[in-house]
Image: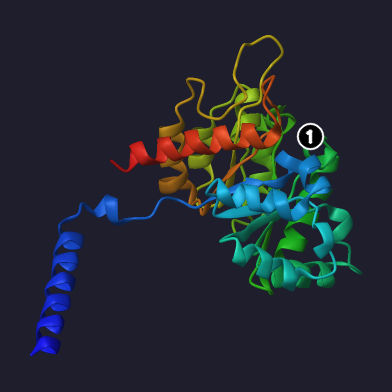
């Protein structure tokens, strides 16, 4: 008799939970976009205390981290690093990697390292050929080739912008040239901070190359004397519209906070924490 009453109680409780879930608005049921942090933001902290810094970022509520060449004591053991991240509730969302690690003799071992770490999105973060009228041809060719090889591992290698890619070139910009002369399977990591710095509209480029902005950098780059805050969300940028376009047009999978400037009196970790809290508030408002 007692067991029957207990069973009936849990049956009613489960039924109530299901009813409440079904009555919730569809948007409320969806989880927020996963948020990562570019580890370059806290590069010095990582060198001083790699594990402690990862722990601090996990406590801020990040879902993932984007690597930029620093692996602490795990540089020869990506499997152990993946386990460490998992224990903190983190994953490796993506990584920045130079062409020096993508040469013919290194490419396979490089891809294997990141595959073991759990990374499927790799981005070349800098190459001066990207704003050179002659060099851009070889850059596009090399990007296309390494991305094609990465596809065989179910991975992608794309390109990340700074501001000079948005200088005029052939009635458009260097960024347009890269986008139109590489396969549509190659992701374009749009850095919103640098796009704004170049006085361009990020939404225009997200829409112009749909489905290619799989991971984007959310940050603010300031011009000298413009009185902008480098903390994400503290200026009047239309972040909600940008994020909606990333979702609808860009096919974004990861929002990546990068902090390259730090307000006076704030440490890099404190600056990252403020930017993360502001992004959480923006996403919460969007889901209402």
Determine whether, in the image, residue 277 is placed left or right of residue 39: left
Determine whether, in the image, residue 248 is placed left or right of residue 36: left
Name the residue at 49% across, 24% down.
237
> Which secondary structure, mark 1?
helix
Quadrant containing the C terminus is: top left
**Which residue occupies the foreground of this view, 108 or 36?**
36
Name the residue at 41% across, 36% down.
281
Determine whether, in the image, residue 237 is placed left or right of residue 118: left
Name the residue at 58% across, 25% down.
200
Estimate the x, y position of residue 63 in percent, counting from the top left.
54, 54
Q: How many marks?
A: 1
Can residue 196 be seen in this snapshot? yes
Quadrant containing the N terminus is: bottom left
Determine whether, in the image, residue 33 is placed left or right of residue 10: right
The residue furthest top is: 225
Can residue 123 be seen in this snapshot? no
Q: Residues within 10 Å of mark 1 (few under 14, many from 20)?
A: many
Estimate the x, y position of residue 287 in percent, counting from the top left.
32, 43
Estimate the x, y position of residue 103 in percent, counting from the top left.
88, 62
Residue beneath label 1, please?
131
Is 122 placed above or below 1 here? above
**Which residue occupies the foreground of this view, 76 or 244?**
76
Is 282 placed above or below 11 here? above
The residue furthest right is: 105
Name the residue at 11% across, 73% down.
12
State the colouring used for the structure image.
rainbow
**Which residue occupies the foreground of this view, 168 or 92?**
92
Estimate the x, y position of residue 15 in percent, counting from the top left.
14, 71
């Amino acid at each position: 008799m007692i067991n029957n009453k207990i069973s009936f109680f849990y049956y009613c409780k489960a039924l109530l939970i299901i009813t409440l879930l079904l009555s919730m608005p569809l948007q409320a049921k969806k989880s927020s976009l996963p948020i990562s942090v570019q580890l370059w933001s806290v590069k010095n902290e990582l060198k001083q205390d790699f594990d402690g810094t990862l722990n601090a970022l996990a406590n801020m509520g990040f879902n993932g981290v984007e690597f930029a060449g620093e692996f602490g004591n795990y540089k020869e053991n990506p499997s152990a690093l993946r386990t460490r991240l998992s224990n903190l509730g983190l994953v490796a969302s993506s990584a920045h990697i130079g062409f020096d690690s993508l040469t013919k003799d290194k490419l396979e071992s490089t891809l294997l390292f990141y595959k073991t770490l759990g990374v499927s999105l790799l981005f070349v973060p800098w190459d001066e050929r990207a704003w050179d009228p002659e060099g851009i041809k070889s850059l596009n060719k090399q990007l296309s080739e390494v991305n094609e090889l990465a596809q065989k591992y179910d991975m992608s290698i794309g390109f990340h912008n700074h501001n000079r890619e948005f200088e005029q070139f052939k009635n458009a910009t260097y960024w347009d040239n890269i986008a139109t002369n590489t396969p549509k399977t190659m992701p374009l990591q749009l850095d919103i901070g640098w796009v704004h710095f170049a006085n361009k509209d990020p939404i225009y480029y997200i829409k112009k190359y749909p489905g290619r902005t799989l991971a984007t950098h959310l940050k603010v780059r300031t011009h000298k004397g413009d009185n902008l805050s480098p903390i994400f969300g503290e200026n009047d940028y239309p972040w909600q519209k940008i994020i909606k376009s990333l979702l609808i047009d860009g096919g974004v999978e990861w929002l990546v906070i990068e902090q390259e400037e730090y307000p006076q009196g704030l440490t890099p970790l404190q600056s990252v924490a403020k930017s993360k809290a502001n992004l959480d508030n923006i996403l919460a408002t969007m889901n209402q």
